[in-house]
């Protein structure tokens, strides 16, 4: 069946919610990895706007702008629409229909035990979660399985969601016959970039450095980064392992890591000097992305054409999978 056919292919689905501007955590934690995979895998990358509605249902008018900005950032980071299929989730109806069908066979207890369910509720101060919010992992499973994907690139925080997708696939296959592959988790080993205040980088915390930030904005935010509270003045020995600045140093200036660590621990390197050098390195690293963004922003029609073309291609692929699902379920 389809499972046997797809086991010989290397197919990936991954997605992002269009809920505001992308930050450096998105870039280093996901996009860089996606770019490295697109030559080896058949890639479907989804702008998952239905997922966005689970928490942003009161402001859907902002979605169109966020979708456009996300596509621009993806291409600026190096995702190539010639090698990767870009889709808008809501434009591919099979996502929603498979979500509905999978929800019929997914126990609620499976959803309530997903770690991020509680974490996101607390982070966004959600006191009365919606049905869609609880069912978010089932929609995510549908996003993956509708392409018969056999791998998903994620960070460690999303690994439980992929395990749930595997469980849903196993349950479907047990009930209706082998159709879906159980997708593997491709863990991204890149360290998580903290926010400038040392907490998790999040738009809701206001501690982000955005991919679209201009050089002076990057410099200003780096200058505001929290540092080791015990290193009050130059000459005080610091603790690099507890300082958010060093997480960025490892990504944007690894060649200077030993210099920075030695100088910090000895007290010879002041925090202000370190931040200035790091900011220069970050601005230089982000310059190609800034230029590519500017180029794409001058051609918005082309960006929308890429999204429309990719979504049409996805409709063809997912319609075939959905037909197999319906047949298996005697619908």
Image: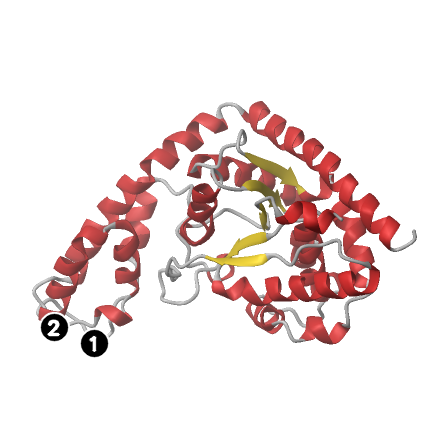
Tell me, for residue 236, which label it has, or none: 2
Q: Position of residue 136 (x, y in %)?
A: 69, 61
- Across and down, in percent, residue 239 comes to 21, 72
Residue 147 visible from this viewpoint: no
Q: Residue at left 11%, top 72%?
A: 236
**Which residue was labeled with disc 1?**
230
Q: Nearer the viewer, residue 319 or 133?
A: 319
Number of other residues with Cα within 10 Å of mark 1, as a class: few under 14, some 14 to 19, many 20 or more: few
Alpha carbon separation for disc pair 2 and 1? 8 Å
Q: Left or right: 100 with respect to 7? A: right
- Taking the spot 78% from the left edge, 59% from the top edge, the residue there is 102
Work out whether residue 51 or residue 121 is closer to the camera in this orientation and state it.
51
Taking the image as shown, residue 54 lies to the left or right of residue 36, namely: right
Q: Is residue 147 above or below residue 269?
A: above
Whether residue 191 is visible to the viewer of this picture, yes or no, is yes
Above-or-below relation of 70 to 225: above
Residue 295: which quarter of the image? top left
x and y percent of residue 223 in the render?
Answer: 26, 55
Earlier residue among tags 2 and 1: 1
Circles 2 and 1 in contact, beta carbons < 8 Å: yes
Name the secondary structure under disc 1. loop
> Dot 2 lies on which element?
loop
Mark 2 neighbour density, 10 Å: few (under 14) some (14–19) many (20 or more)? some
- Colouring scheme applied when the structure was drawn: secondary structure
The percent position of residue 169, horizontal first and vertical second, equals 71, 61
């Amino acid at each position: 069946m389809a499972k046997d056919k797809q086991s010989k292919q290397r197919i990936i689905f991954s997605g992002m919610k269009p809920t505001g501007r992308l930050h450096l955590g998105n870039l280093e934690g996901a996009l860089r990895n996606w770019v490295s995979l697109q030559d080896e895998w058949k890639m479907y990358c989804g702008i998952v706007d239905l997922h966005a509605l689970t928490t942003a249902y009161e402001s859907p008018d902002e979605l169109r702008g966020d979708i456009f900005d996300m596509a621009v950032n993806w291409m600026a980071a190096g995702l190539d629409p010639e090698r990767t299929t870009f889709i808008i989730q809501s434009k591919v109806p099979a996502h929603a229909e498979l979500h509905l069908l999978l929800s019929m066979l997914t126990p609620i207890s499976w959803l309530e035990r997903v770690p991020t369910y509680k974490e996101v509720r607390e982070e966004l101060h959600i006191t009365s979660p919606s049905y869609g919010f609880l069912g978010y992992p089932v929609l995510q499973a549908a996003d993956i399985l509708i392409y018969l994907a056999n791998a998903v690139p994620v960070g460690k925080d999303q690994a439980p969601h992929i395990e749930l997708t595997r469980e849903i696939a196993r349950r479907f296959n047990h009930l209706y016959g082998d159709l879906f592959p159980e997708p593997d988790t491709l863990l991204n080993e890149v360290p998580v970039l903290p926010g400038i205040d040392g907490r998790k980088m999040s738009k809701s915390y206001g501690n982000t450095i955005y991919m679209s930030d201009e050089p002076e904005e990057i410099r200003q935010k780096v200058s505001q980064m929290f540092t080791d509270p015990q290193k009050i003045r130059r000459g005080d020995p610091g603790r690099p392992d507890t300082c958010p600045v060093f997480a960025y140093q490892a990504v944007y200036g690894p060649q200077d890591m030993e210099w920075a660590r030695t100088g910090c621990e000895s007290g010879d390197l002041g925090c202000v000097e370190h931040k200035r050098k790091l900011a220069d390195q970050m601005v230089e690293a982000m310059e190609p992305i800034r230029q590519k963004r500017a180029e794409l922003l001058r051609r918005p029609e082309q960006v929308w054409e890429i999204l429309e073309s990719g979504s049409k291609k996805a409709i063809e692929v997912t319609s075939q999978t959905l037909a197999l699902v319906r047949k298996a379920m005697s619908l």
